[in-house]
């Protein structure tokens, strides 16, 4: 609102220049008073507030133009409008007021067995951004169990509940949602329209069971007629060895998930086709970067153009581009995926429990910090050991890195913002 203007009380004998000087002084005094009020009462602006990064449902403050007949005045001397001076509310400005620990928890996907999801109630209550379901047969009441788990989310901001429901031999809950064949079968026998239609049926049932994210489609270009193994991470998980077929099938699969209200995660950037090994079991290399740019990258480009909301980055080293695993490389994530390809959505790591990560000299918690520094937004790990202890260690490593100046707080806020954005959470509503 506008503050009431002061009435000009000049005397009949005062010279014109004296009146102008007094009026200007009064306007400056009012502006200073309003500024002081804002500094004392503004709850959204903080010294750490980051520049909003594609925050959903936010806009800058509007400026109301003066009526056509109003006299022209110097903006620097006008009484400021509170609506135009106050900081605009965005997810970023809200997140800037969160503790580092709470921000860190939002970047972690906690693993849990789908038969005992209540095991991670304490982690969800502490603000974990997601849970990753493991298993091969989901309980019939999974939906009600997950609903109960979500009730523990601080502020009821929603929870990413994710699983690997690719098709073929990699399905966690087919007893509840129905079967899909291996991607290789889909790519060879189904049209893109048929892929989308069949995936939508499965996704609709996943959503009904309160699972809202699928770590699929695999858009690696492979085409080898073999089952995935230690030496070949793809095989039948790939739609084809033809880049064009993979691009079209990947977008169709992605759109099928979205039509069923499930968030797709396109993987494994920048492409595992032709890898030297399976990174789950040891160090692995992709094909040379010069080759990937021609064969492996186009399916990701197609998915991004089609509106991919999330992308998973692999744990493979990319010869000619990175010396660290891709999930820990700023060149792969920030320069290529974010920069050159212009991806604005959520970036997830592949499991940081992989042997390729430890072989590169990183603990799980150390890898989590490096992944966030490199541009990833959410980190994942395998089910095994003490999940509560591991989750706490990761969160502590992230907060310690911020406190020690090894991870910019603005980067942590940015990552947390992407986690909320993919769920369409608006902290300002």
Image (cartoon, rainbow, N blue to C red):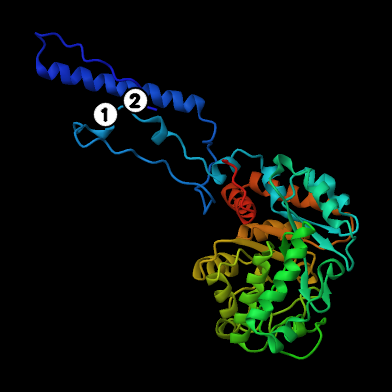
41 lies above or below 340: above
Say few, some or many: other residues with alpha carbon within 10 Å of mark 2 (under 14 / 14 to 19 / 20 or more). Answer: some
In this rendering, would 316 be left or right of 340? right
- Contact flag, marks 1 and 2 (Cβ < 8 Å): yes
Quadrant location of the C terminus in the rendered image: top right
| Residue 32 appearing in the image | yes
Element under label 1? helix
In this rendering, would 206 be left or right of 383? left
Q: Residue at x 56, y 80 (%)?
A: 298
Quadrant location of the N terminus in the rendered image: top left
In this rendering, would 376 be left or right of 11? right
| Residue 360 appearing in the image | no
Say few, some or many: other residues with alpha carbon within 10 Å of mark 1 (under 14 / 14 to 19 / 20 or more). Answer: some
Q: Earlier in the sequence, mark 1 or mark 2?
A: 2
The answer for how far apart the CA atoms under marks 1 and 2 are is 8 Å
Expressed as whole percent of the image width and height from the top left, the position of residue 87 reads 46, 37
- Say which quarter of the image contains residue 76: top left
- Residue that carries the numbered disc 2 in the rendered image: 31
Q: How many numbered callouts?
A: 2
31 lies above or below 204: above
Q: Residue at x 80, y 70 (%)?
A: 355
- Residue that carries the numbered disc 1 in the rendered image: 77
380 lies above or below 171: above
Expressed as whole percent of the image width and height from the top left, the position of residue 2 reads 36, 26
Q: Residue at x 80, y 58 (%)?
A: 209
């Amino acid at each position: 609102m506008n503050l009431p203007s002061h009435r000009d009380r000049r005397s009949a004998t005062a010279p014109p220049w004296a009146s102008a000087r007094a009026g200007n002084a009064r306007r400056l005094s009012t502006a200073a008073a309003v500024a002081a009020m804002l500094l004392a009462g503004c709850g959204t602006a903080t010294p750490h507030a980051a520049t909003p990064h594609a925050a959903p449902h936010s806009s800058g403050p509007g400026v109301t133009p003066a009526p056509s007949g109003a006299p022209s005045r110097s903006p620097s001397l006008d009484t400021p409008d509170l609506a135009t001076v106050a900081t605009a509310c965005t997810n970023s400005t809200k997140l800037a007021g969160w503790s580092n620990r709470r921000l860190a928890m939002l970047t972690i996907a906690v693993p849990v067995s789908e038969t005992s999801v209540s095991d991670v109630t304490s982690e969800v209550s502490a603000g974990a951004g997601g849970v990753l379901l493991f298993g091969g047969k989901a309980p019939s009441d999974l939906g009600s169990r997950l609903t109960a788990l979500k009730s523990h989310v601080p502020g009821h901001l929603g929870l990413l509940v994710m699983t690997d429901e690719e098709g073929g031999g990699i399905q966690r809950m087919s007893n509840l949602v129905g079967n899909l064949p291996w991607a290789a079968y889909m790519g060879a026998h189904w049209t893109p329209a048929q892929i989308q239609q069949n995936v939508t049926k499965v996704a609709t049932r996943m959503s009904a069971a309160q699972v809202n994210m699928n770590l699929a489609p695999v858009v690696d270009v492979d085409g080898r007629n073999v089952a995935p193994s230690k030496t070949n991470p793809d095989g039948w998980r790939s739609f084809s060895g033809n880049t064009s077929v993979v691009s079209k099938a990947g977008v169709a699969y992605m759109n099928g998930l979205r039509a069923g209200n499930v968030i797709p995660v396109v993987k494994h950037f920048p492409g595992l086709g032709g890898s030297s090994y399976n990174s789950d079991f040891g160090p692995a290399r992709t094909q040379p970067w010069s080759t990937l740019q021609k064969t492996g990258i186009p399916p990701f480009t197609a998915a991004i153009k089609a509106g991919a909301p999330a992308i998973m980055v692999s744990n493979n080293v990319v010869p000619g581009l990175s010396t660290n695993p891709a999930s820990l490389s700023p060149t792969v994530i920030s320069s290529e995926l974010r920069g050159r390809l212009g991806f604005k959505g959520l970036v997830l790591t592949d499991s940081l429990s992989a042997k390729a990560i430890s072989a590169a000299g990183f603990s799980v918690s150390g890898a989590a910090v490096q992944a966030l520094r490199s541009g990833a937004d959410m980190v994942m790990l395998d089910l095994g050991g003490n999940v509560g202890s591991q989750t706490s260690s990761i969160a502590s490593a992230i907060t310690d890195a911020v406190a020690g100046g090894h991870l910019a707080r603005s980067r942590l806020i940015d990552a947390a913002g992407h986690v909320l954005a993919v769920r369409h959470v608006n902290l300002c509503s």
